[in-house]
Image (cartoon, rainbow, N blue to C red):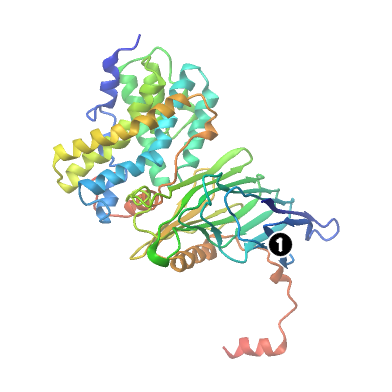
Amino acid sequence: MNGGVRIRTEADAETGRTRIVELSATAPLGVKVTGPEEVHIIGTAAAPLDGDVVTIDLEVGDGTQLTIGTVAATMAWPARGDVSPSVMIVRAKVGEGASLRWLPEQLVPVRGCRHVLRSEVQLAATASVVWREEVILGRSRNDEGPGELDAELRVVRAGVPLLHQQLHLDGSGGAAHTAASLLGTARALGSLLVAGPGAPEHFAQANEPGLRGAVLELEAGGRLASATAASAVDLRKWLEARRAGMAPPAAQPGDEEPPATPSDQQELLSR
Amino acid sequence: MPTPSDLLLLADGRLPAGGHAHSGGLEQAVELGDVRDVPTLRDFLRGLLRSSGQTSIAASAAAARAWLSQDDAALLELDAEESARMPSAQLRGASRAQGRQLMRAAEAIWPSPAPLRLLPALPHGPHLSLAQGVTAARLDLEPVDAARLAAYGVVSGPATAAVRLLGLDPFAVHGVVATVMGDAEPVIAAAAEHASSPAWLLPGGAAPLLEIGAELHRTREIRMFAS
């Protein structure tokens, strides 16, 4: 199956507000608009399977904002034979003064899968991005290990490479990724990239049973919270705490909410 | 004509280029209890060859090729691409410090009439792999030699640190170095083969625990190695 999603935003000529001007999806993916500047991607079939090529194309126009989520974890299922891997390509282009939040659920390379993930993010000089990636190293059931995964994230700002991360899991169930320099005994790994003007200073480290993490300062600008964890829940909790500290206060649609009702005000006062 | 012994001199841990002050992330791995003995050391080193080490080896070969082609733009691109693959500021700092020291040492040991064109553009010094590649090329060595030099540094640096930190049997540790250098041969060959590829194609996977560990290491008060 070759399908995917295409989303494009533009600033409204009069109000300057974000308008989603293009929104299309073909199986195995669907889309649902969940807010003025927010879209969720839905898997409509058991995908990705081997041989599938799924493409997600995001174009965040100058001065606009877009948040993307997915409704469930992406399961990369076992290959059915000696065929090509399942491929997911994510291409994002973020314009001047624009902001993209890519906050999908986890990727689970199920034992026996062969999956390729290519993410390429192009930022204009004044663009902002929050980009989360989490990989669960196989289903927890039976403690099975992960399948074969070849994941790459490349982020470029105005032609300068900001971040280029590659993760290779050979799917053999052997010790290829368990080295102390790579992932050790972790069951999940993840990172959260925050880059763009106005991002507050934020440093954090964690070295606890079940979670290790640090906020890394990239040379060409931006910060990367990186962590390995014993569980998807611990990982998400830590990354979300980092997101709260690292991400610039966004001009959320919620900021324009009508004033609080009298009862709300009372509640505030009584605190 | 290259002098074959120049490669040995460059790879020697006793070369006064500051390499002895760095453990390649091993000290933190020992501190965290991740590397405890010879087998965990071997896995640690093999992990490096699949991640940051692979990048360094490829970048060293590519830098040698770029230097031979007098392609300064390619050298600067390689430097930026290596940084993009090294999110930890600690690791980048250690790499650049060692790169700077190697350039200085090489200049003193093998004075060259040609000024080192790379240095002015990189005020904090080139990444170690770039310095290795450029130095090897200046000595008429081939990109494959530059790749091997980088690989030997990736493997032998943490290994000798392990002897000091864990008191491991030096014979067993050097046995591991020999074995892992054997594993590195395909990586070295691939680095030489792709030495002319565009810089953005530099290989190398993430080493999350190495990167996180490097940041944890920075804040430790008592340590034997700078990185």
| Residue at 42% from the left image edge and 65% from the top image edge | A140
Residue B103 or B54: which is nearer the viewer? Answer: B54
* Image position, residue A208 (x, y; %): 34, 65
* Image position, residue B89 (x, y; %): 42, 46
On-image quarter of the N terminus of chain B: top left
Residue identifier under label 1: A31
Q: Secondary structure at mark 1?
A: strand
Residue at the extreme front of the image, as rendered: A81
For this view, does B8 lie left or right of residue B59?
left
**Above or below, A224 relative to A259:** above
* Total numbered labels: 1
Amino acid carrying mark 1 in the image: Val
| Residue at 68% from the left image edge and 66% from the top image edge | A252
Question: Does residue B89 appear in this view?
Answer: yes
Q: Residues within 10 Å of mark 1 (few under 14, many from 20)?
A: many
* Image position, residue A54 (x, y; %): 64, 50
Question: Does residue B130 appear in this view?
Answer: no
**Above or below, B2 relative to B189:** above
Image-quadrant location for residue A235? bottom left
Residue at the extreme right of the image, as rendered: A14
For this view, does A172 lie left or right of residue A36?
left
Residue at the extreme top of the image, as rendered: B1
**Above or below, B60 relative to A183:** above
Q: Chain of mark 1?
A: A
| Residue at 53% from the left image edge and 52% from the top image edge | A80
Image-quadrant location for residue B143? top left
* Image position, residue A170 (x, y; %): 43, 47
On-image quarter of the C terminus of chain B: top left
